[in-house]
Image: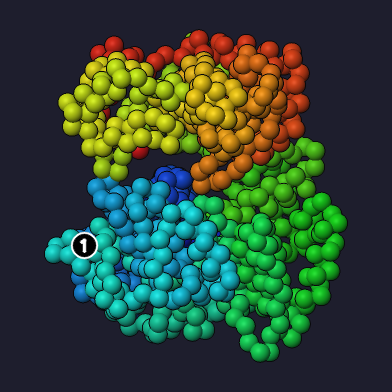
Amino acid sequence: MPKQKIVLIGNGMAGMRAIEEIKKLRPDDFDITVFGTEPYPNYNRIQLSKVLQGDTEVKDITLNEWSWYEENDILLYPGETVVKVDKKSQVVFTDKGREANYDYLILATGSNPFMLPLPGVDKEGVTAFRDIKDCEKMIEYSKKYKKAAVIGGGLLGLEAARGLLNLGMEVDVIHIADYLMERQLDREAGHMLQTELEKQGMNFLLEKQTVEIIGRNRVTGLRFSNGDRIKADLVVMAVGIKPNVSLALETDLEVNRGIVVNDFMETDTPNIFAVGECAEHNQMVYGLVAPLYEQGKALAKRICKLEDKGYKGSILSTQLKVSGVDVFSSGNIKEYDSMKTIKLKDDWRGTYKKITIENDHITGAVLFGDTREGNKLLSFIKKGVQIEEYLALGEQTESNESLVAEMPDDELICGCNGVTKGTIVQAIQTQGLSSVEQVKGCTNASRSCGTCKSLVSELLEYTLGDEYSETQQETICGCTTLSKDEVIAEIKEKGLTHTREVMNVLGWSTEEGCSKCRPALNYYLGMINPIDYKDERESRFVNERLHANIQNNGTYSVVPRMYGGVTNSEDLRKIADVADKYEVGMIKLTGGQRIDLLGVQKEDLPKIWADLGMASGHAYAKSVRTVKTCVGADFCRFGTQDSVGMGIQIERKFEGLNTPHKVKMGVSACPRNCAEGGVKDVGVVGLDGVWEIYVGGNGGVELRKAELLVKVKTQEEVLEYIGAFLQDYRENAKYLERTSAYVERVGINHIQEVLEDKQKRDALNQSMEIALSAVQEPWSEAIRNGTLLRDLYEKVKVSE
């Protein structure tokens, strides 16, 4: 009997999830053909903001690789659009002249971004934020221009704004309401969100109505209804989406706002289905991932002819995905006279919780700052749980160690993919799972927005007990099931010496690895065997490969080494001469007391280094960078110690040392702490007869105060403890883990315990000396190496 034919129009998340469900239920019963307008395999659209924010790359958000389609016998036509459907003959026609017959047709055409019909909307520099193409356009613009305006203070607009900030742009967010995310948050949470994002550098223009996009051909600014104007080189429109129903209208299907479907996602033509953002169910059109996946399940059961109650609609929930901000919202959060609310605000911790109650049942919730209860509250809202039950559970939870232990089996852990606690526990027990990545691969939990990873980790610990350790079981990336510690152990045991060898011998699932594992393996190999390991430049990020910082316009910046922040007239003259000779765009003093030469062309880098005759400041590297100092006892009226001399000693000793992430230090000579050691990776404060050493500080996005490691009396002891701490960090931190995160994870008490042991401290310092002996000055090394000069600075196209 010939197989029945399924044609899917739309290679996005909703349509492909429906196909995945069909393959689970009836893996061999259908011939499946997929048409997708975008030239990519199925990717995770809601992770686009992370690509824009620089947290990941496009290839890392791919849900199903090209090989997945082949392995599942699915015919995919990427970059090909279906332009006509003949319902009578059951044939679709594409823009490339292809025809395909179907028994079942699934429309998953998604939605289009809504572009305000403003004068000037067609100018160069105006874009939506909807797909990879938009993302690439914004990244490209950030290399040439400085000022961006995002119209829309909703979820997508804020994620776009955060990404543009990361790309180095100044960002104005224009919003017509008087507080952010007014559909998902109440005024209190909206204002807290605004305050938090302003700290990150966003500028908000609220209660502003844009009436014109200014510019001749390319956008130069915006004009508002009150006559105010702002400058802008890039305008991102993030004001909403509208279902893409053009093909459905031409096919004469019933369309309202979206393609009208019943509980089984059937259109008014029984063998034609619609799913996702293009579909309208019970007068609702959904734009979040969880409802789309629930729809896909109902559709799959219908096509596979399995009994099912069908799709009954969804209660929506939202989690904001902006670095450093945790926000959750679900259900009805508006307040009416008939409602009661529970509100808890903690100004000190920056947290806020509001629960809305109608007729003694929980109907909605807003969480800010601490969203761990999000999935539980979503589950309670769906079930209409009484408030007394929630309060009683809260009291129990406070007295117990594990939150997940109290959850019933049917409670959702992953709201995006509808995965319950019971499903995950069963998979762990029956499939022998031991890592978050394995749970993700087996159950789909944390496969979408990823905010439930911590709960999945807690469930692993709860289910496996002592057999599970998060730090041991977290894999390096999706290319392997091995953790960082397991990979390091295998490298040592098997004597592996190259990244490709590690991948081959340890059974990597991808031949080339990915942007996460390649630089990590390069670091681990160098850390384990610093003398013999030959650094693989191709596995490093572009700044480290070229020993200079790439800027938003494609030029580079150069920071010469100035030990302890001290310079002299001779070096200043050389820097001034180089700046004139190579016409650098700007000379800027950095926050680390160094001079930054910005706007340097790539081919001029080696010539500038040669003319300077100074060492690299390592301002680009995952390594020890600067040691900031105050003027100390020689000049300061309050100084009690030689902070400059101490800072120079530290910088000279550890310069160029490769570390899991960048390391910044500061040395002050009195409690005034002018070198800001309290927010450095290592901060040293000299007092009368004593040096205090602090570690784990961070003055960046994730602000963290450093913790006191130890008090010592001599400069030799300062170097000894810093050396031992840095080597402990080098050996035990995960790649790209800042000292702030490392100290937070393992605890200052543990680090103190290790370093208080003289024998362990000496062993760490011995390993440190070996590592330091292999350090080479990168600028002079590059100047001497003709092959490297030719390949890296003349011919190779630079890409992130």
- Quarter assignment of residue 683: top right
Residue at image location 23% in from the left, 37% down from the top:
585
Please state which of residues 50 and 294 is positioned toward the viewer in this rendering: 50
| Amino acid identity at mark 1 | Val
Residue at image location 85% in from the left, 61% down from the top:
396
Farthest residue, direction bottom: 337
- Quarter assignment of residue 727: top right
Please state which of residues 65 and 513 is positioned toward the viewer in this rendering: 513
Residue at image location 68% in from the left, 53% down from the top:
455
Residue 378 visible in the displayed image: no
Residue at image location 40% in from the left, 61% down from the top:
203
The colouring scheme, among rainbow, by chain, secondary structure or one colour, is: rainbow
- Quarter assignment of residue 717: top right
- Helix, strand or loop at disc 1? loop
Q: Is residue 71 above or below residue 687?
A: below
Q: Position of residue 447 (x, y in %)?
A: 55, 53
Please state which of residues 451 and 78 is positioned toward the viewer in this rendering: 451
Q: Where does label 1 land, which residue?
A: 219
Q: Position of residue 774 (x, y in %)?
A: 48, 11
Q: Is residue 715 above or below residue 732?
A: above
* Screen quadrant of the C terminus: top left
Q: Position of residue 700 (x, y in %)?
A: 50, 43
Determine crowd level at label 1: few under 14, some 14-19, many 20+ residues with C-alpha closer than 10 A: many
Q: Position of residue 221 (x, y in %)?
A: 24, 64
